[in-house]
Image: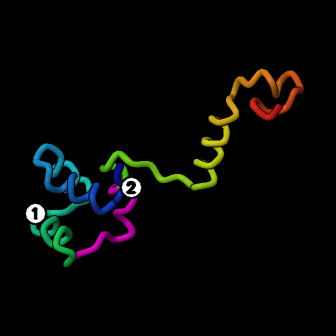
Amino acid sequence: MQKPSMERAFRQALTDPSVRADVRDRLGWDDSQVSRFLSGQMGLTIDKIDAAVECLAMVITSRKYLDFLAYGAQVGTACYCVRAGMGECGTR
């Protein structure tokens, strides 16, 4: 399994004919800007970051939040043991 990559996501979106035009239009780019971006000759300006992340169907979140979700899933949101005062599941 590959680690998620913004570079890979942009390359896929900007080379896929079914989504390229939508991404290009939402970023306010023309075809020459897309080519320069993909070749590394042009970057993404800060005012386009939100639109770019949205175009890629991605969401920005913090590690702290993801750690909380992982811990909550491990303990279980409906854990009977904790609610009955017997500690965390699997600790006794």
* Residue ID at (67%, 37%): 72
Q: Give the residue type at disc 1.
A: Asp
Say which element carries label 2.
Answer: loop
Could you tell me what secondary structure mostly forms the magenta stretch? helix
- At mark 1, the secondary structure is helix
Tell me which label, 1 or 2, sits earlier in the chain.
2
Q: Amino acid at mark 2?
A: Lys
Up/down of 22 relative to 52, above or below: above
**Gap between marks 1 and 2, in whole Å?**
29 Å
Of residue 68 and residue 58, the one placed in the foreground of this image is 68
What residue is at 35 percent from the left and 59 percent from the top?
5
Q: Which contiguous range is marked in magenta?
A: 42-52
In magenta segment, residue 49: yes
Q: Position of residue 47 (x, y in %)?
A: 38, 66
Against 5, is 67 above or below?
Answer: above
Could you say where residue 92 lies in the image, as x and y percent from the top left? 83, 31
Task: Look at mark 2 in the image and give the residue it sits on.
Answer: 3
Which residue reaches farthest front?
Answer: 92
Q: Which residue is mark 1?
A: 31
Q: Nearer the viewer, residue 9 or 20?
A: 9
The image shows residue 48 at horizontal and vertical percentages of 34, 63
54 sits left or right of 83 in the view: left
Task: Place residue 43 in its image quadrant.
Answer: bottom left
Question: How many numbered marks, from 0 up?
Answer: 2
